[in-house]
Image: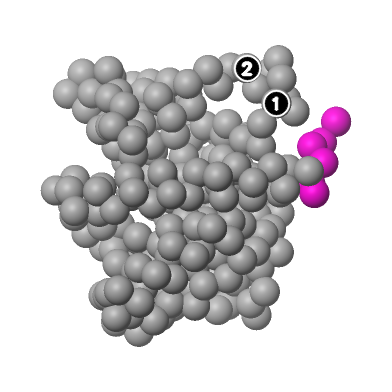
Amino acid sequence: MPPDRDRWLTLTRETWNERATWWDECSELNAHSVERTADLARTTKALRLRPGATVLDAGCGSGQFAVAFAELGCLVTGIDVSPEMLSRARAHAVERGVSVAWRDGDLAHIADPAATYDAIHARVSLQFMVDLVATLGEFRRVLKPAGRLFASVPGALSPIYGRSWRRFLEPEGAAVNFVTPWELEALLVELDWRLIDGWGEFGQTIDGVANPLSARVMAGRDRRLRQAAATTWAIIAE
């Protein structure tokens, strides 16, 4: 039985409103790390961002990446389901002196015309979608024909997911779909996206929980195993 959409969205909004202060504080600390600087550079290159590029930060949270893209000269829209997250995102944009269009909304129903964006950035947000097919369909609709999607989700063994196997026992237990990197890749291909690139991040979670399966330990392993072990796995598609 499919999950109740309204209940899912309400639970997601309430959960992230409650976590907004914690998430923002962790994100601000992370924003100044060496790893984050390298991650931003790799993401920017993979999405082929340039000054004037239109970017949708889909599930923008407290806005750290949206603000960073705006500082690069991009025209950024940030959408999130949590008003508390967006309040913090707005404050960061003001502090950094950049303009971002912030919107409260459901990513399965994006209020933009077709072919609006050069790039979509969906970092660890798709696991919170009640309907992934509808969400990816909206991404396709609002993305320009030559545009690119960055999507990252935790690996199945990631400390972010923890006991993700419980999705099979308690499908209504939380507003998380626990999609894995290979499941997301397969769905993208089924929906006629073309996979361009992919890589794993094996560092700490945003709140400092270490991943015992480090990049060094996983080097040279089977790709599916590396995807399972990754703290998050990034996918570039068009």
Q: Which residue is mark 1?
A: 173
In the image, which residues are magenta?
1-6
Q: Which residue: 65% across, 64% down?
A: 105
- Give coordinates of residue 78: x percent, y percent: 49, 68
Q: Which residue: 43% across, 58% down?
A: 62
Q: Which mark is residue 147?
A: none
Q: Which residue: 30% across, 74% down?
A: 95
- Give coordinates of residue 77: x percent, y percent: 49, 73
Check the picture and name the quadrant holding the N terminus.
top right
* Relative horizontal placement of residue 228, taking residue 13 as reference (left or right): left
The outermost residue toward the left is: 34
Q: Amino acid at mark 2?
A: Arg
Tell me if residue 11 comes above or below residue 39 in the rendering: above
Q: Amino acid at mark 1?
A: Gly
* Relative horizontal placement of residue 223, taking residue 130 as reference (left or right): left
Q: Confirm whether residue 156 shows in the render.
A: yes
For label 2, the SS is helix
Tell me if residue 165 comes above or below residue 192 in the rendering: above
For label 1, the SS is loop
Q: Which residue is mark 2?
A: 166
Q: Nearer the viewer, residue 142 or 61?
A: 61
Q: Which residue: 29% across, 37% down?
A: 201
Check whether the beta carbons of the residues at disc 1 and disc 2 lie within 8 A of each other.
yes
Tell me if residue 229 comes above or below residue 62 in the rendering: above
